[in-house]
Image: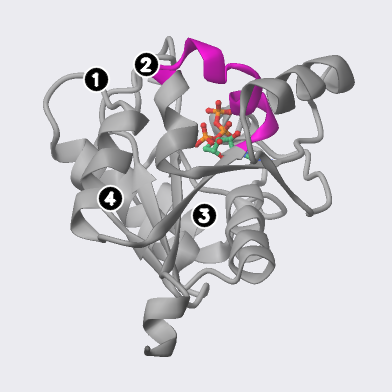
Amino acid sequence: MTTEALSPQRIGVFGGAFDPPHRGHVALARTAMAQLGLDRLVVIPTGHAWHKSRDLTPASHRLAMAELAFAEVPGVRVDARETRRPGASYTVDTLKELRVENPGAQLYLLIGEDQARALHTWHAWEQLPTLAIICVAARADATGAKGQFDALRAELPGLTVLHMPSMAVSATEIRQRVALGESIAPLVFEPVARYIDQHLLYRPN
Ligand code: ATP
């Protein structure tokens, strides 16, 4: 029996709006690669985010910024599939596709604490733990953590906590800072900041 047959491929799946991708996203990806011993990690910018009330920046920009943000993380690939899919982007559909494409692989779904709390509102959320191991990263601005986190553990068998220091950075804050003409240097990597500048993203109309 080969080593490959003994240890299935470990593939991380990290979805989000990435509008824009920031240092918190990259820290989460690096933590997951190391802690979970991932063979690779697929970063999947969402197409139509059914759970966000505002319109997202066009997918072409978010994909380009994700390429720049994750370029330095070995093993990460940006995947455009959800931006090409008509209708709402559902994680359950993406995981099912990845399972078909990678038979025998173990998938790890990476999410931040805020999304983990809202997981029960996701489409077909009960299926998620049957398709992937759910891995949650603590998030600095989260409130009322304990009770709900415990409840989540009860609902999601095998829930894994990613051990990374909480980072109080959000895409919302970055968009707000750009609109106000403030520096975003501490929150995003330089190539992303340059892209935002060159393409006049997040400026007030
Ligand atoms: P927004 O402020 O526009 O809602 P965001 O900063 O939450 O955006 P998303 O692209 O929506 O970024 O997040 C993608 C995923 O990354 C989600 O699972 C989210 O919980 C997680 N995430 C985002 N920022 C952090 C952070 N600072 N620490 C841990 N997880 C994070």
4 vs 3, front mark: 4
Q: Are marks 1 and 2 in contact (CB under 8 Å)?
A: yes
Cα distance in 3D space between marks 4 and 3? 35 Å
Residue 120 lies in magenta, yes or no? yes
Report which quarter residue 55 is drawn in.
top left
The segment highlighted magenta reads: 112-125
Per the image, the residue denoted by label 2 is: 123
Viewer-side label of 1, 4: 4
Q: Which numbered circle lies on residue 193?
A: 3
Q: Is residue 110 above or below residue 102?
A: above
In screen coordinates, is 91 left or right of 197?
Answer: left
- Say if residue 90 shows up in the picture: yes
Residue behind mark 1: 88
Q: Residue at x 59, y 71 (%)?
A: 37
- Mark nearest the camera among 2 and 3 is 2
Q: Nearer the viewer, residue 9 or 116?
A: 9
